[in-house]
Image (cartoon, grey):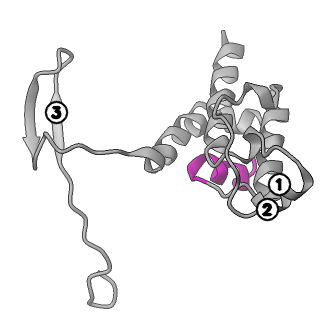
Amino acid sequence: MRGGLPESLHFGALAVADAAGRLLAAWGDPETATFLRSSAKPFQALAVLESGAADRFGFTPEQVALMCASHSGTDAHAEGVAGMLAAIGVAEGDLLCGTHPPLDVARRLEAAGTDPGPLRHNCSGKHAGMLALSEFLRQKR
């Protein structure tokens, strides 16, 4: 509620299962198919933050934001992800998220004959975060 008016209304379903996949309890319809896609990114980024990996690699708040959401592949986004990869010590080729034309700069890149590359993929920040976590845990061994 905001100012006495409903701002938003949320519905959900919850299922609790054991290790064998047997349903133990449910609220709502446990058969509801849900596709988290990008809405899971903040939860995936949480592991990077809580582990200490983001601090270890000196990620800025803007770079943390790139891990938490899809982006549109602007120069600033690509530069932010490139900075993350440099801090981790990995290469752009280590991003296995593929490529696709970025929303905001696709025409400019096409006119220049430039491949967008994985830095401009809308999930590259999340993938860079996962590389950071992996490298952080590898170094802790």
Q: Find the magenta span and give its range.
A: 60-70
Residue beneath label 1, please?
A: 110
32 vs 85, left or right, is: left
Horizontal and vertical percent position of residue 13: 17, 49
Q: How far apart are marks 1 and 2 (CA)?
A: 5 Å
Residue beneath label 2, please?
A: 107
Q: Do the residues labelled 1 and 2 touch (CB within 8 Å)?
A: yes
Identity, as a three-letter code, of the amino acid under mark 3 = Val
Q: Nearer the viewer, mark 1 or mark 3?
A: 1
Q: Distance between the residues labelled 2 and 3?
A: 47 Å
Identity, as a three-letter code, of the amino acid under mark 2 = Arg
Horizontal and vertical percent position of residue 53: 67, 32
Q: How crowded is mark 2: few (under 14 residues within 10 Å), some or many (20 or more)?
A: few
Tell me where residue 134 sits by quadrant: top right
Tell me where residue 141 sits by quadrant: top right
Q: Which residue is drawn at 17% across and 14% down?
A: 20
Horizontal and vertical percent position of residue 78: 79, 49
Q: What element carries label 3?
A: strand
Residue beneath label 3, please?
A: 16
Mark 2 / mark 3, whichever is N-terminal: 3
